[in-house]
Amino acid sequence: MAQAINQALRRVPAWPIYLLGFAWIGALFYRGATGALGPEPVEALEHAYGELALQLLIAGLAVTPLRKHAGINLLKFRRAIGLMAFYVLIAHVLVWAVLDLQSVARVWADIVKRPYITIGMAGFLLLVPLALSSNNLSIRKLGGATWRRLHRLVYPAVILGALHYVWLVKGFELEPLLYAGTIGVLLLLRVPRSRRLATA
Amino acid sequence: GGFGAIASPALAQDELEPNSLEDITSYNNFYEFGTGKNDPARNADALETADWRVTVDGLVDNPGEYSLEDLIGGLTEEERIYRFRCVEAWSMVVPWRGIELADILDRIGVQDGARFVAFETAVQPDNMVGVRRRVIPFPYVEGLRLDEARHPLTLMATGIYDQPMPNQNGAPIRLVVPWKYGFKSIKSIVRISLVEEEPPATWNIINPREYGFYSNVNPNVDHPRWSQATEREIGGGLFAPRKPTLMFNGYEEEVASLYEGMDLQEFF
C-alpha cells in the first residue's frame, strides 16, 4: 500500500503546490472583494489565511512521522508545503496589518500590548529565516547539520501559531484545540526518535 | 416614554445609514446556534417561536407566564435606528422596531426594592446546535440596573425593518441597549426578573477580567485582547477605513448622567 503510494507520487511534481496555493490566496481575495465572503470580508480573509497557514504547517510536520510510521514518503513536497505555509502566513499578516488595523501605530501597539498577537508575530518571525534558507544553496552553504538544526525553529513557531489561535477565540471552541492537539501529537511522535539519536 | 425624551437621539439618528437586512441577518453572534458569524443564519431556522412565553417574576406586582400579546399588546411600537457596537470591535446600524422596556416594566409593576432587571434566553437543546456543544454555559443570562432598564433608549425589539424579528437576531423578542456592547442586548428572551442584587451576566461569569457587568461602549477602556478605540463598520467591504469608536457608542448625551461619579475604568 505505502509502496504503491510512493510509486504513484514519484511522478507527481511539487510545483502545483505553489500554483494551487497562490491561486487559492488570489481567489479568496477576489471573493472577499466582490462580497462573496459575507458582510465582513476582512475578518473572513484573516481567519481563512491564518487557518490555511496552520494547516500547511501541520502538513509539513506530518511528513517525517508519515515516513517513519507509515512508510509514505512525501519528502520531496516538504519544501513547497513549508514555503507555501509561509506565503499564506504573509497574506494573513498583510490582511491584518493593512486591511484590518490600517496603521503602523495600531500594528505596533497590538504587538506590544496583546499577548496573542505578540506570540503570533513571534511565530511568524521565527519562520522568516526558515523561508529564506529553504533552497539548495542555503543547505550547501550552511551544511546539512546546521541547516537541520536551524529548521527545528519550526517546532516553536508552530506551537506559537497554535496558541495564537487558541487564545483569540471567545468561549470554549473545539477547532483551535483540535489544531493544537494535532500539532502536539505530531511533535510527540518525534520525541522517541530524537532520544534514540541522542543515545546513539 | 414621552416623545420629548427621545427627541435628541432621534435627531442624532438622522445621519445614520442602516445596514441592509442581508448584512444584519447574515453576520450574527448567537452562540446557541454556533460560534461562526454565519452559523445563526444557517441554523436558527430551528428555533421554535410559536406560542412564546415570557416568565415574569421577582419583585413585580403582576408575576406570571405572559404570552407576547399579554406582555406587549397595546404598547406603543416605534422604529429606532441605532448604532450597534459589538465587543469584538465591529459595528452596524440597525433599524429596530420595538417597545420601550420602561413601558413593559410599568405593565408588570416594579415593586419597591427592585434595583436590577435580569433576563434569560430560551434554551431549546433539540433546536439549538450550539447548546448541545456547550461552548458557553446556557441559558444565556444578562442584566441591567433598573435606571438603565428604564432609560427611554432601552428597547425590547420585535422586528427589524418591516420584518418580524429574524430568528438569528433573537426572535421573537430581544433587548436592545444601544450604548452597551452587543452581548448585553440579550436575544430570544423567556424570563424577566426584577431583583435586588446585581444579577449574573454570562460573559461576565465566563471571564470577568474581559467582560464587565456594565460593558458600556468605551473607546478608552480596551478589551484585554484588543483595542476598543476604533471599529470596523460591517458592510463597508475589504477596503473600508476603521472608524473611531464613540463614547457610549454615540449616546453620551443621553446616558452619561446614569454613570455620574462612577469610575468607568473600574466599572467597565
Image: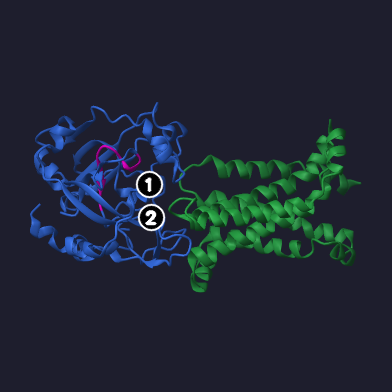
Chain colours: A green, B blue
- Part of the protein shown in magenta: B168-177
- The one nearer the camera, A15 or A93, is A15
- Name the disc covering residue B22, or none: none
- Which chain does the numbered disc 2 sit on? B
3D distance between C-alphas at marks 1 and 2 = 11 Å
Which residue corresponds to mark 2?
B87
* Relative image position of residue A83 (x, y in whole percent): 73, 57
Earlier-in-chain disc, 1 versus 2: 2
Q: Residues within 10 Å of mark 1 (few under 14, many from 20)?
A: many
B40 w.r.t. B260: above or below: above
x and y percentages locating residue B67 in the rendered image: 18, 30
Residue A157 visible in this rendered orientation of the protein: no
Depth check: give the residue in front, A144 or A9. Answer: A9
Total labels drawn: 2
Asked if the magenta segment contains residue B175, the reply would be yes
Identify the residue under disc 1.
B203
Task: Say if mark 1 contacts mark 2, CB within 8 Å.
Answer: yes
What residue is at 58 percent from the left and 42 percent from the top?
A177
Q: Is residue A83 above or below residue A102?
A: above
Q: Amino acid at mark 2?
A: Val
From the viewer's perspective, is B114 left or right of B248?
left
Q: Dividing the picture into quarters, in which one does residue A118 lie?
A: bottom right
